[in-house]
Image (tube, rainbow, N blue to C red):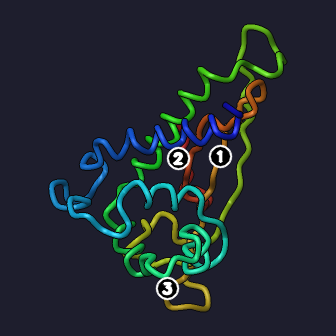
Amino acid sequence: MSLHKTIQSLFQSAVQNVVSHILDFTLRSGNDFTRNRKFPADKLISFLVTQGAASTRVEMLDFFGLDAAMPTSSAFRQQRAKLKPEALEDVFLSFNSSFFQLAPPQNHIADGYRCIAADGSTVSFFSSRRFTADDYLVSEGHSSKGFYSLHINAFYDLDRNMYTGALLQPAIPGVLQHG
């Protein structure tokens, strides 16, 4: 099997692992993701991981292959609101664990040690206080809703050429939590 097919298979296995116990990752366990919908949990997770920077509608057209029967943007938002962020974290960890066992180190920078690079970036975005913790609010600015900033520290394994984790923190000076 080619490498890209193997990676796809590992990703789908990680998604199915989460979907097999999706009630652990829903806000209303016992209610959410129990009915058959156009946007089931596996499609939702795959879409969230593959979504690019275009509008939701354009991304959905790309993901569903211009299918006229695809779900609406509203259906996407409703389904996304049911899913806890830990679902994506579990997919990431499960995929990385599988890939880590499959992929031997490509480089040997320091034999006997894992070389992990850490790099941080700040991302600003508009949101509503309903969806984002106040710790992330930077300024009311010129809008009534203000904008939010998030500092992302990504960790990259230099020997295996793969991301191993990320730490998300408020980007406001004095609010960053160390630990």
Whether tag 2 and tag 1 are in contact, CB under 8 A, the answer is no
Q: In the rendering, at what x and y percent does residue 97 appear?
A: 53, 28
Label 2 sits on residue:
177
Residue appearing at x 62%, y 59% in the figure: 173
- Is the residue marked by circle 1 packed among few (<14), some (14-19), or many (20+) residues within 10 Å? some
**Which label belongs to residue 145?**
3
Q: In the rendering, at what x and y percent does residue 77 appear?
A: 40, 74
Query: Looking at the rendering, in which quadrant would you find the N terminus?
Result: top right
Nearest to N terminus: mark 3 or mark 2: 3
* Of the pair 63 and 159, the residue shown nearer to us: 63
Q: In the rendered structure, which amino acid carries the disc numbered 1?
A: Asn
Nearest to N terminus: mark 2 or mark 1: 1
Q: Is residue 8 left or right of residue 85?
A: right
Q: In the rendering, at what x and y percent does residue 29 appear?
A: 19, 54
* Of the pair 6 and 120, the residue shown nearer to us: 6
- Is the residue marked by circle 3 packed among few (<14), some (14-19), or many (20+) residues within 10 Å? some
* Of the pair 166 and 60, the residue shown nearer to us: 60
Compared to residue 20, the image places residue 146 above or below, namely: below
- Which-is-in-front pick, marks 3 and 2? 3
Q: Is residue 176 left or right of residue 135?
A: right
Q: Label 3, secondary structure: give it.
A: loop
Q: Label 1, secondary structure: give it.
A: strand
Residue appearing at x 41%, y 54% in the figure: 42
Q: In the rendered structure, which amino acid carries the disc numbered 2?
A: Gln
Label 1 sits on residue:
153
Query: What whole-number distance in Å separates the C-alpha atoms at marks 2 and 1?
Result: 12 Å
